Image (tube, rainbow, N blue to C red):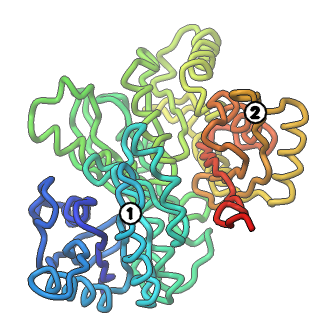
Amino acid sequence: MSLKLAITGRPNVGKSTLFNRLAGRKMAIVHDRPGVTRDRREGFGRFGDLDLSLVDTAGLEMAKTGMEADMRAQTLHAVGDADVCLFLVDARTGITPLDEVFADILRKSGRPVVLVANKTEGRAGRDGILDAYSIGLGEPVAISAEHNEGMGELFTAIIEAAKAAGLETEDTGEEQNDADKPMRIAVIGRPNAGKSTLINSLIGEERLITGPQAGVTRDSIAVDWSWDGRPVRLADTAGMRKKAKIIDNLEKMAVGDSLKAIMFAEVVVVVMDALSPLDKQDMQLADLAEREGRAVVFAVTKWDLVKDKAELLAHLKERLTRLLPQLRGAPLVTLSGLTGRGLKRLMPAIEGLHKDWNAKVKTRDLNDWLHAMTQRHPPPAVQGRRIKPRYISQTKNRPPTFVLMCSRAKHLPEAYKRYLINGLRDDFDLLGVPIRLIVKAGKNPYEDKKPD
């Protein structure tokens, strides 16, 4: 049975774009002009392991008569009939009065609601994410439907909303222990880096076609496997070259499939050829996985062909620390997929990083840590006024996400945020894990009060 998902929001926030993205094909007309969608458009899609019955709705209008009133009725009908509602807001425009009206309607509907901040690509989009908190529907999921960013986070939010409402999905079903759920691992890298050979060696059979030529793998192939009694789902992906070199449509589709595998993975293994490791494309792939919030492990294959192993290993560790500081401490495993040498170190490294990716830190420990960090190095004064961090808590894991409440939040320097993130990484043993730190200003209780 599929989960019925209604995509709602005011006009021109990107509902039809997201509908097409989830459906996997262009079914709804997309245009910059508001109000293109009028009727409810229904379709089906598969999002990760989840079957979806999708409903694209018209933008909410407040008119009580005419076509706008009919559009409003269609939208409200879709909300009442849905299992879960996605409420889209435009992160670039910010929260409008119409967004607040619609939020109140959704609250009264009794349906599970996932707040989605769309169009978050770029600085203008990122700055608007914090504004979405003010609408009072929980933590917004930051996505860009047009650029296919944040889909993994959206998938998790939908599953959690359905589970909280007691709805059954293929992915959740009955309550499962974490140990019973397959650990999702995507194996990515440049063409001919040895990804398929690595997976074949891991599972102990010739499950995937391999060959000396680049580009053998085109589709992302999921392989179910068991390691040390734990279910694992490995995704072999097509090799990804630089975007400028991709001309053939088939290769474009294969790369698109690889990007989806990254979005639905929990751990991403970046496979590199030991004879030409850590080139620009390897860095970009690792950075992409980190931006999607995935735990990253580096696997250097064909290690048996390296002559001076100690020198190359030291060089790789130095470059990773310098060029990818956001993944400082990520495991680096050297191995040979062909001979199997060093292979036994890969899965323990993945499992250890997966545990850290799921880590939850107690609020009391966080605030004791924050006090020590600010005592050691107080935030700088900006425009002659001090910034005062007040409180920190972890709002979610996968990856670990923290919210810091402080005065003059918009003025907290990026360098100080990095100082805090590095402290979280070092002091709570979160090396190699993407960390999200959201800085918010607490509402002034006297802001709306008029003087006597």
Q: Which residue is mark 2?
A: 385
- The answer to which of 244 and 420 lies nearer the viewer is 420
Question: Which quadrant would the N terminus be assigned to in this image?
Answer: bottom left
Task: Indicate the quadrant where residue 78 lies.
Answer: bottom left
* Farthest residue, direction front: 452
Residue 394, percent across and down? 70, 58
Badge 2 or badge 1: first in the primary sequence: 1
Relative vertical location of residue 185 with respect to residue 241 in this rendering, above or below: below
Q: Determine whether, in the image, residue 182 is placed left or right of residue 255.
A: right
**C-beta proximity under 8 Å, tags 2 and 1:** no
Q: Kindly identify the residue that appears in the image at 45 percent across and 89 percent down.
A: 108
Q: Kindly identify the residue that appears in the image at 62 percent across and 75 percent down.
A: 177
Q: Kindly identify the residue that appears in the image at 53 percent across and 33 percent down.
A: 298
Residue 227, percent across and down? 56, 57
- Other residues around mark 1 within 10 Å, as few (<14) / some (14–19) / many (≥20): few
Residue 116, percent across and down? 41, 63
Q: How many marks?
A: 2
Q: Which residue is mark 1?
A: 96
Relative vertical location of residue 245 with respect to residue 255 in this rendering, above or below: above
The amino acid at mark 1 is Thr
Task: Indicate the quadrant where residue 94 lies.
Answer: bottom left
Q: Determine whether, in the image, residue 11 is placed left or right of residue 102.
A: left
- The answer to which of 64 and 150 lies nearer the viewer is 64
Relative vertical location of residue 305 with respect to residue 79 in this rendering, above or below: above
- The answer to which of 78 and 104 lies nearer the viewer is 104
Relative vertical location of residue 208 with respect to residue 104 in this rendering, above or below: above
